[in-house]
Amino acid sequence: KPDRELRLLAAEPADTVDAATDSDELAERVVALAHGDLVRAGFYVRTYGSFSITGLAVWSDVADVFLVGGWFISAAGAPSARLESLSILATAAEHGGPVPPRITGVIMDEEPAA
């Protein structure tokens, strides 16, 4: 559930950030990304078409990925296949909002077989 402070963030007309859209720019943005950065990520999925999600980039140690809203921004340091554009709107230090913890483990439904 999004934090109330994050839901209240609004972009000012003067706050335009160019989105990286070509493969080289996307790769550079992914490398520059840090846990907790406020991002706007554009994705393409055949079923939905193009759409964007604005939220905090969350790092997963377990899967070696950055996510926003449950969608993969990157995997193993490279842009995800569905990523069309990426804007870093503010770093975690700049926006000052609450940052969720990194994903450091998974909950298993069953005990692994011995």
Image (cartoon, grey):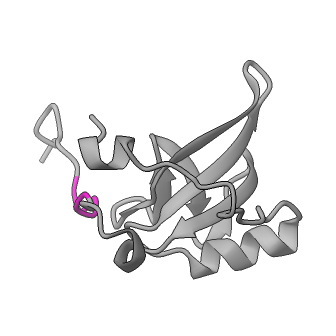
Q: Please tell me whether residue 35 is drawn above or below residue 70 in the rendered image.
A: below
The secondary structure making up most of the magenta span is loop
**Residue 8 point in image, percent of width and height:** 37, 43
Of 86 and 6, nearer the camera is 6
Q: Residue placed at 84% from the left, 60% from the top? A: 21
Judged left or right of residue 111, residue 85 is right
At horizontal 45% and vertical 66% (from top left) the residue drawn is 64
The residue that appears at 73% across and 21% down in the rendered structure is: 48
Task: Please tell me whether residue 102 is drawn above or below residue 42 in the rendered image.
Answer: below
**Is 16 left, or right, of 7 in this rendering?**
right
Magenta-drawn segment: 100-105
* Residue 104 falls inside the magenta stretch: yes
The answer to whether any part of residue 92 appears in the image is yes
Tell me residue 30's x, y (percent).
Answer: 63, 71
Question: Residue 93, how many percent across, how many down?
Answer: 36, 79
Query: Does 74 sit above or below residue 41?
Result: below
Return the x and y of residue 73 as percentages of the image width and height.
59, 55
As for residue 74 lying within the magenta part, the answer is no
Q: Is residue 3 visible?
A: no
Q: 80 or 2, which lies in front? A: 2
Report the quarter where the N terminus lies. Answer: top left
Considering every residue shown, the one lying at the far top of the view is 47
